[in-house]
Image (cartoon, rainbow, N blue to C red):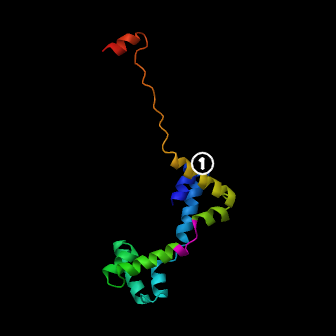
């Protein structure tokens, strides 16, 4: 997610392009329930039970799975890691959508890292007196 923010901030992507990439990334994620069934940590019946609960409470799947005793925190953490690792990377989506080439992306990432390492730029504005007719009056008080 930080990658998209950096590319927009650096002028390499528009906010609309960045949102499109983020949407693609999120939609490429395999649902936690599916991963839990595939990993034999939950049954389809348990997944449907949680999905029914979600329509009432609008709470995250994993939170409900733990509350109902279907998963423990460690299992949920493993499933979330699998979900993230198996989703399409932001870099691939940027390249696949023709927004940047691999070389352009690598150069942009490198440039943004250099900019961050230099620290923030301090542009201190000079404060001018309100009245330019008598500069001594502004400084003598």
Front residue of 99/78: it is 78
Q: Position of residue 81 (x, y in %)?
A: 47, 75
Q: Is residue 51 visible?
A: no
Front residue of 104/93: it is 104
Picture quarter with the C terminus: top left
Q: Is residue 87 magenta?
A: yes
Q: Position of residue 6 (x, y in %)?
A: 54, 53
Element assignment for label 1: loop
Identify the residue position indicated by label 1 in the image. Answer: 11
Q: Is residue 135 visible?
A: yes
Q: Is residue 49 magenta?
A: no
Residue at 45%, 32% (x, y): give it: 124
Residue at 60%, 63% (x, y): give it: 91
Q: Is residue 61 left or right of residue 95?
A: left
Q: Tell me where residue 18 sits by quadrant.
A: bottom right
Q: Tell me where residue 106 sits by quadrant.
A: bottom right
Instruction: Read off the magenta span.
Output: 85-89
Q: Is residue 33 above or below residue 127?
A: below
Residue at 42%, 10% (x, y): give it: 133
Residue at 50%, 75% (x, y): give it: 83
Crowding at dot 1, Cα within 10 Å, few <14 / some 14-19 / many 20+, comes out as: few
Q: Is residue 120 above or below residue 137?
A: below
Front residue of 78/118: it is 118
- SS assignment for the magenta stretch, majority: loop
The number of numbered discs placed on residues in the rendered structure image is 1
Q: Is residue 120 above or below residue 89?
A: above
Q: Is residue 76 above or below residue 41?
A: above
């Amino acid at each position: 997610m930080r990658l998209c923010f950096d590319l927009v901030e650096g002028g390499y992507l528009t906010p609309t392009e960045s949102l499109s990439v983020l949407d693609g990334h999120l939609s490429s994620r395999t649902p936690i329930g599916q991963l839990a069934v595939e990993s034999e940590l939950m049954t389809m019946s348990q997944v449907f039970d949680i999905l029914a609960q979600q329509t009432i409470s609008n709470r995250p799947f994993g939170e409900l799975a733990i509350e109902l005793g279907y998963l423990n925190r460690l299992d949920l953490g493993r499933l979330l890691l699998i979900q993230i690792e198996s989703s399409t990377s932001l870099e691939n989506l940027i390249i696949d959508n023709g927004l940047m080439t691999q070389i352009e992306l690598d150069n942009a990432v490198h440039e943004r890292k250099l900019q961050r390492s230099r620290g923030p730029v301090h542009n201190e504005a000079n404060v001018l007196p309100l009245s330019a007719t008598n500069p001594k009056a502004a400084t003598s008080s």
